[in-house]
Image (tube, rainbow, N blue to C red):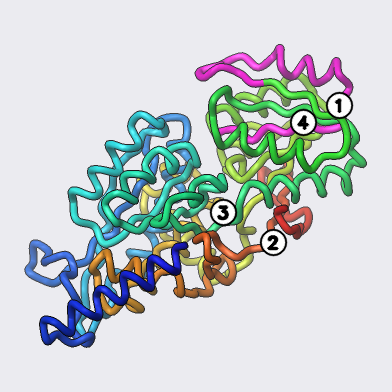
Amino acid sequence: MKRVLALALAMVMALSLAACGGSSDTPADDGGASESGDPVVRIGVFEPATGDSGPGGKQEMLGMQYANKETPTVDIGGTTYNVELVYADNGSTTDKAPTAAAELVSKDVSLVLGSYGSSVAMAGGPVFDEAGLAAIGVTCTNPNITAGNDYYFRICFLDNFQAQVLVNFAKDKFSAQKAYCLGELGNEYDQGLIAFFEQNFDGEVIKDSFPTNTSDFTTYLNKAVAEDVDVIFCPVSIAYATQIVGLAASMGLDIPLLGSDTLDSNVVLEAAQGSNVQLYVSTFYQEGGSPKFDDGIKAWLNEDSTAMTNNGGNDTIAAVTAMGYDAYFVALEAMKKADSGDKAAIMAALPSVTYTGVSGSIAFDTQGDAIRDTAYIKAADTASGAWVLETVQTGSGS
């Protein structure tokens, strides 16, 4: 459907150019000029800077900010444009997300990047759809984000694939026959992943959901122990994950904890440090995958105190940061392919954009989802306080 819409938009634009005697060599309205008078294009950043997903949102934005520092311009139609990042905090909540999305629409951005967090992406998506503004999801993995929304794309794998990968790992590593799944009540990311995990797991699954703002998970972990499960799967936000992992450490829990991409955070890692917690996460990137990127962003983090704070206080590279970096360059590729900063032209070009980034090759299927079949499983080295690559898993995501 997205490719059909893109083709239709391209035909409309071609007819408009012909009617106006225009030339495709001249970019359309490309966003205006900066305060200095130089031409500028604007990329909207739809991310949580506050709320439960704020730590992850900040790390995702770090990748975009570093990319913008590294490559602050884009050439469109023979003219060099400054690239401005325009931010809107979706607050990690579905009630704030539509307002943040509308804010970006009102600021006349050319396209949008984000969000970290599937629930807010689904809540803001209809606003972008109605405005005819393309959005590129960076690490929002719920399949429903792109389903039914012609204007939402993404560069990450999906939750059905991620769940299958984690089930395969639980079977291969622990011969798991009984799993305990724990997620936030009403959170579409958590609950969607748990549903896909249960669908792929051929053993017994015990499920619980905790209310928003829960701060004591003792009852839930004690239940997992009492049920004598082989693994615990908790695809939750960083805020909840740090509490669950910290409690597991203080309890001396010996049941392996499996986490989704949200748990790939140095903040979560620190909660496990110095303990015997067995923590494994699925993710998009492993530090060392691109030495040039790793060295460059670590140097920047150590030079910029605000960036370091937003990264959790150290220079460990989160996978979402690498993904944010790649998403920025996918946006530039879309502008160059469109030969314009006009949102309709970019939407017309986006389905056929391809890019090879630090996280791998990026292309879109007909749904607007990334064509990816590989995930990394990291293990927490609780002695050194570092993530180590456990294995690379593949799957079909069926």
Disc marking residue 229: 1
Quarter of the image for residue 219 reads top right
Q: Which residues are magenta?
A: 209-237
Camera-nearest residue between 2 and 342: 2
Q: In this view of the protein, can residue 303 be seen by the observer?
A: no
Distance Cα–Cα, label 2 vs label 4: 22 Å
Q: Are marks 4 and 1 in contact (CB under 8 Å)?
A: yes
Q: Residue 21, image x and y in percent?
A: 11, 87
* Amino acid of disc 3: Ala
Q: Is residue 10 left or right of residue 78?
A: right
Q: Residues within 10 Å of mark 2 (few under 14, many from 20)?
A: some
* Amino acid of disc 4: Ile
* Amino acid of disc 2: Thr
Q: How many marks?
A: 4
Q: Which residue is mark 3?
A: 319
Disc marking residue 232: 4
Residue displayed at 54% across by 29% down: 187
Task: Please report whichever mark, 1 or 3, sits nearer to the chain's N-terminal start.
Answer: 1
Q: Residues within 10 Å of mark 3 (few under 14, many from 20)?
A: many
Distance Cα–Cα, label 2 vs label 1: 27 Å
Task: Please report whichever mark, 4 or 3, sits nearer to the chain's N-terminal start.
Answer: 4
Distance Cα–Cα, label 4 vs label 1: 7 Å
Distance Cα–Cα, label 2 vs label 3: 14 Å
